[in-house]
Image (spheres, coloured by chain):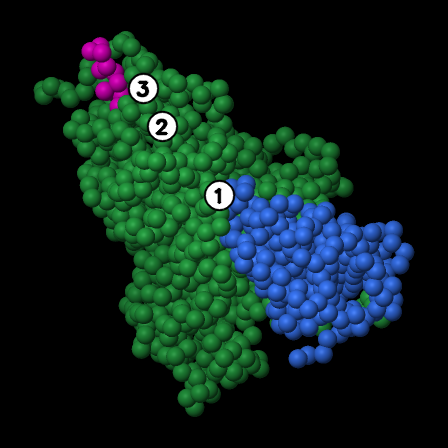
Chain colours: A green, B blue
Amino acid sequence: MAAPSPLPPAFEAWFQSRGWSVRPHQLALLEEARAGRSTLLVAPTGAGKTLAGFLPSLVELAGREGKAGGKAQGDGLHTLYISPLKALAVDIARNLDAPVREMGLPITIETRTGDTSAAKRTRQIQRPPDILLTTPEQLALLVSHRDAAPFFASLKRIVLDELHALVTSKRGDLLALDLARLKALAPQVSAVGLSATVREPADLQRYLGGAETPAGLVTVAGGAKPRIGLLDTERRLPIAGHTTQHAMADIYEAIRAHKLTLVFVNTRMQAEFAFQALWTLNEDSLPIALHHGSLDATQRRKVEAAMAAGRLKAVVCTATLDLGIDWGDVDLVVNLGAPKGASRLMQRIGRSNHRMDEPSQALLVPSNRFEMLECRAALEAVHEAAQDTPAPRLGALDVLAQHVLGVACSDGFQADALYEEVRTAAPYADLTREDFDAVVHFVATGGYALKSYERFAKLRQDKAGLWRASNAKVIQQYRMNVGTIVESTMLKVRLGRSRAGRPGHSPVPKAAGMLPRGGRVLGEIEEYFAETMVAGDTFVFAGEVLRFEGIHENEALCSRASPGTDPKVPSYAGGKFPLSTFLAARVRAMLASPELWHSLPEEVASWLHAQRLKSRLPQPGELLVETFPRAGRFYLVAYPFEGRLAHQTLGMLLTRRLERARMRPLGFVCNDYGMACWALGDMSAAIARGALDLDDLFAQDMLGDDLEEWLAESALMKRTFRQCAVIAGLIERRFPGQEKNGRQVTMSTDLVYDVLRRHEPDHILLKAARADAATGLLDIRRLGEMLTRISGRIIHQPLDHVSPLGVSVMLEIGREAVHGEAADEILAEAEAMLTEEAMA
Amino acid sequence: MTTREAFMLGRLAIVPDLSGALFLPEERTLVVADLHLEKGSAYAMRGVMLPPYDTTATLAALSAAILRLRPARVIALGDSFHDRQAEARLAPQTLAALHLMQQGRDWLWITGNHDPAVGARVGGESADAIVLGGVTFRHEPDPVETGYEVAGHLHPAAKLRMRGRALRRRCFALSPRRCVMPAMGAYAGGLNLRDAAFRPLFREGLSAHLLGDGRLFRIDPRLLLPD
C-alpha cells in the first residue's frame, strides 16, 4: 500500500488477516465522522454497512488515551446504536464483538432491551458501556430518565440501522424527537444512518441531520443485479383469489432444488395457507417451517435457530423476516402474491445471497391476473432500481404528546425552547405553535375547553416557567406506556387437549410438541378476527386446522379439527399492505399500452384484449366506471387503482350517496385495483336519463359532510382513535378495570370518543386521529388525491354483462360483501329473526 | 311518536325507553340506573384525563327523557355517583341543572355500592329500596327475590353478529319477574348478557331489548354472543 493508510495499524492488520481491504464507503464515513458530520449511507445488502457505521467509533475508541489498552471505563457513553428490532440489536452486538476481541480493543459493548434486567439497567446508567445497542422505545425511556443529561453528555456517535424502515411510521416520529433531544443534550454528537436503496435519499438526510441541516450522503452503487423470475407454470392463473394454490407444486419443486428458500407472503392467513399446501405436497418430508408475528415467540425463536443452524429447507414467512437478521444461507426468495411495492420487494429479495457481488435469486408468484400485472410492473421497477418510498411523514401529534410527557419526566422544559427543539426534527418542521401548545396542555390537564382538571394536572409550571411532571406516579405512568406500537386486542389461541388423531404439522418440524394440561398456547389472533367466527368454524393456525370452540376471557379456545377437515378460508385474505401509488401508476400505464402485453402470459394478455373489445381499458388519468345488470341486481364497478384501504373508504361513502340517490345499494367489494357495488336500482338507466350523475357521485365533497357523518360511527375510526389515545397517554395500555375477571364491567374508548366528538370536536386528540385516518386505515388522503385527479374525467361504460376486469374485482374476498354500517338496519334484521317468544 | 311497548311485572306496567330509562305510566314514574356521575373526574384524579363532559352528557340524556315523559317522580336506581367524593366535585352549573330537573317532582336516590350514602347537596331523598305496585326497586338484583324486581348494577349489554359485523349495545334484560336496566352513564361500560352474573337472575329465560339509534330492538337471546 503506497499511500499511508487512514486506518490505525491494528485495524489495517485486522482487515488483512481477514483477507479484506477496507472499502471506499467505509473510509468515506470515517472521514465524515472525523469532521463531525452526520451522514446517510445508502448501500445494498452485503456491502458491509454495519461495519462502516461502527468503524469511526471503533477507531476513535481504540485511540483513546493515546494507545490501546488505555482506560476503557469511565469516559461515559460514546456510541448509541438504534435498531427497529430487538433481535437485530442483539445480533449486531454479537457481530461487533469479533473485531473488538480479535484486535484486543478495550471497548465495552452492551445491549439494552426489554429483556435487560433491572440491575443491569441501573448499572448501565451509573457506568455506561462505550457502545450501547438498543431500540427506539428503550431510547425514549433513557431520554426521559432523570439522569438523561449526564448520561448522554459524552455521546459522540449515533448509528441508526435500517433507517428506511424506521422513518415511515410513528416509531420514526418518536425517534426523530428523541434524536432532536440527544442533539440538545450532546451538541457534539453526529449521526450515521444506514439504509437500503431509497428513491428520495434527501428525505432521509433531512430526517437524520435535522430539518434545517440535512446529513451528508454516501452511496454505494448497486452490487450484482438480482435474478428475478416470474413463475412460469403450466397451471391456469386464477381470475381472482389470493391462495396461489395453482403454483404450489412448482414452488415445492423450487424449494427442493435450492438450499434454503424463504417464501414471503403478505398476510398471516396466506402464510398459514401456503404452509399447509406445501406440507400436503411434501412427500420427501422436507423440513419446511412457518414464521409469522402471531406465532408464539418461543416457536419463532426455534425456527430462527433452526434456520441459522442450516436445518431447514424452507421457511414460509410474513413481514416478520423482511428486516435485518441473516438467519441462514438463503439462496432463493419466493414472493407469493403481489409485491405491493417495489421497495418491499427489493428488501425481500435482498434476504437471499448476502454477498454483494453475487446476484440474489428470486421468484415472483402472482396469485391472480391483476397480480400478474403488478408483478410485471414491480419487476421492471426493480430492474430500473426504481423505488416507491412513501412521502415523508408529518409528525403525529399523539407521538408528540408522549414525547412532551417524557421530557417533563426528566429535567422538565421551557415551552419556547422545546418548541424550537421539536421543530428541528424533520417530521415536525412545520408544527405550529398553536398545535404545540395544545399538545402541552393536553398532556398537563387533558387540554379541554372546560378547564376542570387543573387541580389534577400531570404537568405543572414552576416559578421559572419550567414544565415538570407533578409527581412520581406520573413518571411511572409514562414509563408503563412508552412506545407507539398499539397492538389490536389479541386473544391467545389455546389448543385444548386433543381427543385423538395425529397432529397436523408442528410449525417447527420435529419440535418437542408437549401438551400440558389444559392445552397449550399456539399464539395469538386479533380479537376482531375471532369475533367473526362461531363455535364449530374451522380455520388454519400455526399450521394446523383448528376448530373454534369459543372465547373465554382473553383466550380463543380451540380443538383440533378431525383429519381431512377443510378450513373455512377466512373472508379477509387481501394484502395487509396496500398497493403503492408508484406501482399503481405503472400498472395503469401497462393496462393502457397493448404494445407491452407481449411480455405477459397468453391468458393475461387475452384477458386484457377481451376487456378492450367488450368494454374499454382504463386510461391513465381517467376513471373508468362500468355499469351493468346481473342476476336481478345492478352493478357499478370503478377502477381507481388506489389500494384496498382507499377503495373501502370510497365504497362506504359511495353507498351512502347511492342510498340518497334512491338506488338502494346492497353492498360492495373491493381489492387493490377496483371496487364493485351493487344495488336494486338500475344505475345504467338512471345515468342515461340523467337521474344519476357520475361526476356528482364521485365529487370531492364526499370527503366533507358524508365523511364526517360516516366517521361518527365508523369502527375503523374508533380503532384509530383508540390507538391515538393510547400513544398520547390519554388512556393507559392497561386501562384500570380492563383486566378481565369475568364479572368485570368494561368501559371502552368508544364511549370516550362519542363524548369527545359531541362536546369538543376540535380537540387535539381528534385532530390527531383524523390525521391518522387520512393516511392509515381509511387512506383518505389517497382517496382525495384520486378524486381530484379524475374530476371531470370519468368515463362511463354501460354494459350488458360484467366485463373481464370486472369479474376479477367481483370475485374478490370470497364474495363477501361489506355493508354500510347503519346499526339499526342490522338490529332490525336480527329482530326479524325472533323465533322464540321468551315472554308472552 | 311511536307507540311504546309495555310489559307487565306482576300488575305493574313498565315501558323500556330508548334513552335507557324505564317508564311506569300508571305511577308517572321514570326510573334510571347507574348514572355514574363524575366518573371522568374520578379517572382524572388518577391522572387519566378523560373528557370532562360525561356528567353533562348523562344529565342531558336524563333531562331529555324527563322533558319528553314528564314524570311526577324520578328514581335513580343507585350508582348515580361514581364515588363518594363525586357529589363534592359536581360543578355549580351541574348542580343547578340537577335542581332544575327536580322541581315539581319527587326525586329518589336509591343507594348503590358506589354511592352508599347520598348527601343533601344534590337534593331529593334517598333510600335503600322502594316498592311500587308490588315491585321492588333496588340497585343490585337479588337472586333470591321471590317477588318482582327492577334493578341496575350489572350494566347489561348484548352483542350480536349479522352480515359480518359485530354490534354491541346496551340493553334491558327482561323476564316476567325481573327487569335489569342498562346503565345510563356516558362512561358506564357494559357487561355482556352471556356473563355468568346474569344466569341466577334469569333461569326461566329472558328477552333482550337493545338500544338502537332510532328505537329499541327485541333480539332473540339465542342470537346473542359472548364477548
B91 and A540: which is toward the camera: B91
Q: Please state the chain letter of the residue tagged with numbered disc 1 in the rendered image.
A: A
First to last magenta residue range:
A57-67
For the residue labelled by badge 3, is the local secondary structure a helix, a strand or a loop? loop
- To which residue does mark 3 refer? A76
Going from N to C along the chain, the mark reached first, 2 or 1, is 2
- To which residue does mark 1 refer? A455
For the residue labelled by badge 2, is the local secondary structure a helix, a strand or a loop? helix
On the rendered structure, is A803 left or right of A791? Answer: right
Distance from disc 3 to disc 1, alpha carbons, whole Å, reads 41 Å
Q: Are marks 3 and 1 in contact (CB under 8 Å)?
A: no
The reply to whether residue A61 is visible in this rendering is yes
Q: Are marks 2 and 1 in contact (CB under 8 Å)?
A: no
For the residue labelled by badge 1, is the local secondary structure a helix, a strand or a loop? helix
Q: Relative to residue A249, is residue A324 depicted above or below? A: above
Going from N to C along the chain, the mark reached first, 2 or 3, is 3
Mark 1: give few (<14), some (14-19) or many (20+) Cα within 10 Å: few
Give the position of the N terminus of chain A as an image quadrant.
Answer: top left
Q: Please state the chain letter of the residue tagged with numbered disc 2 in the rendered image.
A: A
Q: Give the image location of residue A132, x and y in percent.
A: 36, 25
At label 3, which amino acid type do we have? Gly
- To which residue does mark 2 refer? A148
Comparing labels 2 and 3, the label whose residue is closer to the camera: 2
At label 2, which amino acid type do we have? Ala
As drawn, the residue found furthest toward the bottom would be A689
Residue shown at 23% from the left, 39% from the top = A209
Residue shown at 27% from the left, 9% from the top = A70
- Residue B60: quadrant of the picture: bottom right
- Residue A113: quadrant of the picture: top left
As drawn, the residue found furthest toward the right would be B146
A331 and A153: which is toward the camera: A153
